[in-house]
Image (cartoon, coloured by chain):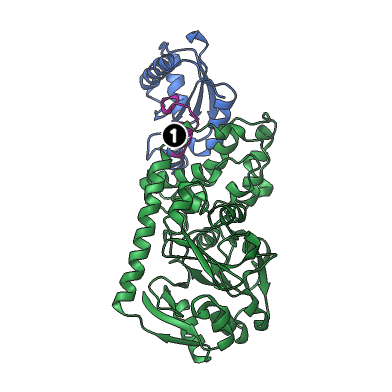
Chain colours: A green, B blue
Amino acid sequence: MTYVLAKSKNSEIHEAGECGGAVTSIFKYLLDENLVDGVLTLSPGDDIYDGVPTFIADSEDLISTAGSYHCAPTMFGDLIQKYLSDKKIAVAVKPCDMRSIDELIKRHKINPENIYTVGLNCGGTVSPITGRKMIDLFYEIDPDDVVSEEIDKGQFIVELKDGSKKGVKIHDLEQEGYGRRNNCQRCDIKIPRKANIACGNWGASEGWTFVEINDEKGEELIKGAQKAGLLETKSPSQDAIDARSKVEGIMIKLSKKTQDAIYDKVNAMEEWNRCIRCYACRDVCPICWCHENCEINKSYFDESQIPPKPIAFQGIRLSHMSFSCIDCGQCDDVCPMDIPVSLIFDKLQKKYSNRTGYIAGVSDDIKPPLYSPAKEEL
Amino acid sequence: MSEDLKIVGLLCNWCCYGGADTAGTARMQYPPNVRIIRVMCSGRINPSMIFKAFEEGADGVFVGGCHIGDCHYDAGNYKWSRRAKIVQDIIEEFGIEKDRFRFEWISASEGEKFQKTMDEFYKTLQKLGPLTLE
């Protein structure tokens, strides 16, 4: 594992990108050298609370995608699996995106040869609706006046058209029920170490991106972009490395605290009874891919009552994939009855990993132990 | 009425079903509340089957398989043992007591063990009473 600091040598990208535009430069290198068919990334939607997954095949279009999108909680794993599995692609991934890609590789739905993953450290995402509400309430700013947002030093900071900035501590926002999505508050994987490289501003000086190189492919990426004259690198000081791991440590500690506070409440929750059997959580789940042959649709379950008993709907889904739940929170976002679906899946994955040591999308085992033919009791 | 407690018993063809048979031919008394369903191997039991049983009104579910190492299909009971733990994890989140689900390894010659297990399981369920799911 090696660390470098990187920034773009291309002045246009340097201006547009977050912390020096290293990620955009790496994508430009991959497209220019024809190493990939295209790049899957987010491009701006209607406003800063919107991001649209876009497949870009021309490096000229990359510049419009630069920057960060904390209010667009998307999920790339199932997009790749459904629409891009036959293409060579590069993709910018949050830790949960990377974990979903890893789980789908284990399920033979994504070919690891075909994909370059550029990881982005992630402190959490904000639901666009919550984002608008909290900017109105806590910042006393019209949400439409905001031109950009960032998360830095525990604050959610918004920038206005006139260049002025205003930040509020995320902790204070979350005390009031706003701030990051619930699953992000629980998430304890902040750096996507399964990606070829993991980039972020933690520990980096202004205008640079701190890059952790995780494997040989990542090494090639950085060296290649350097050779092509797109990337400038230097090695970080020990202080920078320490600062970065300190940030990660603090975030993980906070998440663990949230986990301890909420996991015990799960079995007393009554929200599960609200389910109306709409299948939205299953359809959006990046891990659930076998919809055509889904157990819930088998005749012996399809005829069971509506609304379903939680054990007969969530129970079945839990038994099929909770051990691989990556806690991306997509199911929470789509649930029309506002059931905190991901909470129970995440809790069961934690139970499973405490027993078997298997962490979804992080562990290096070839398959989740439940699928293994090994003769061992776990 | 505890007489009405329903137990669904999923028994593997090669061992536990034989065990129940042995108990029967030896005229050992065990609670008649258990409805036995024969399956070819404990490794073919999905967690969904257990949930289905609870959903349809079972007060307890019992699964019996071959002793570890004795599986007729080599490793079926290992697979089941891993799944069984997930079942335990899941049911307790939905307000079904852990003790309402039980699995045991019983060989075809262990009629006595089958009888004892059924007695014990029935007593546990009597204490817990009928299951009400919301």
In the image, the segment drawn in magenta is B86-101
Residue B45 seen from this side: no
Q: Position of residue A92 (x, y in %)?
A: 55, 70
Name above or below for residue A294 compared with residue A106. Answer: above
Q: Secondary structure at mark 1?
A: helix
Please give the residue where the numbered disc 1 appears in the rendered image.
B88
Q: How many marks?
A: 1
**Residue A41, located in which quarter of the rendered image?**
bottom right
Name above or below for residue A251 compared with residue A34. Answer: above
**Residue B115, located in which quarter of the rendered image?**
top left
Q: Position of residue B16 (x, y in %)?
A: 44, 27
Residue A346 seen from this side: yes
Q: How many residues crowd mark 1 within 10 Å: few (<14), some (14–19), many (20+)? A: some
Between B78 and A55, the one lying in front of the other is A55
Residue shown at 38% from the left, 53% from the top: A254
Between A125 and A372, the one lying in front of the other is A125
Please tell me whether residue B88 belongs to the stretch shown in magenta. Answer: yes
**Residue B111, located in which quarter of the rendered image?**
top left
